[in-house]
Amino acid sequence: MSSRRQTRTATALLNATGAASANVIATRMLAFSNPATMLSPWHQSEAKRMTSEKFKAASEGMLAANAALAMLPYQMLKLGMRPSSWSPTGWMSAWQDAGELWVGVGNAALRPAKKTVVRNQARLGNDRSQGFHALA
């Protein structure tokens, strides 16, 4: 196993997702706070897009986590079959690697949400023609 690759990946995923989410939420709050443009076609389509993207990212995350969970028993068996896992120091390394496998399941579940929110950040950052022009 790599030396804590899944943990480094989880840190990067959480940082990128959190930063992009905060940016998207702030941008949408500013856009939806203008009472003059409330219920415009752009706002209606953005509200529909927000909800559909959340359900899509959640379902993709569940599918990815299920696939990672399906492989988990096999990967755990591979850890237990290593001869080094049966020594005192190798035993601790095997437990740490097993923890990394569980972190990998979380990473698989989070990747679709990160992809969606980063795409929204780029889209909303470039969208000056439909409701954000007054905010620039």
Image (tube, rainbow, N blue to C red):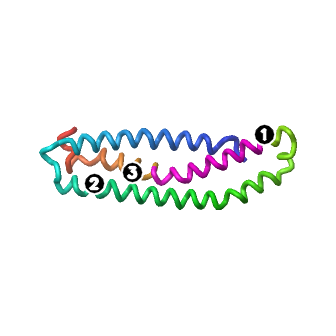
Residue 8 position, x and y percent, is 60, 40
State yes or no: residue 68 in magenta: no
- Against 66, residue 119 (above or below) is above
Question: To which residue does mark 1 refer?
Answer: 92
Q: Nearer the viewer, mark 3 or mark 2?
A: 2
Q: Is residue 124 left or right of residue 16?
A: left
Asked which secondary structure carries label 2, the reply is helix
Quote the CA–CA distance across marks 1 and 3: 40 Å
Q: Of the residues under marks 3 and 2, which one precedes in the sequence?
A: 2
Q: Of the residues under marks 2 and 1, which one precedes in the sequence?
A: 2
Q: Is residue 41 left or right of residue 2?
A: left
Residue 87 position, x and y percent, is 87, 42
Extent of the magenta region: 92-113
Question: To which residue does mark 3 refer?
Answer: 119
Q: Is residue 88 left or right of residue 75?
A: right
Asked which secondary structure carries label 1, the reply is helix
Q: Of the residues under marks 1 and 3, which one precedes in the sequence?
A: 1
Q: Are marks 1 and 3 in contact (CB under 8 Å)?
A: no
Q: Which mark is residue 47?
A: 2
Residue 57 position, x and y percent, is 44, 56
Residue 27 position, x and y percent, is 29, 41
Asked which secondary structure carries label 3, the reply is helix
Q: Badge 2 local density, few (<14 within 10 Å), some, or many (20+)?
A: some
Q: For the residue marked with disc 3, what is the amino acid?
A: Arg
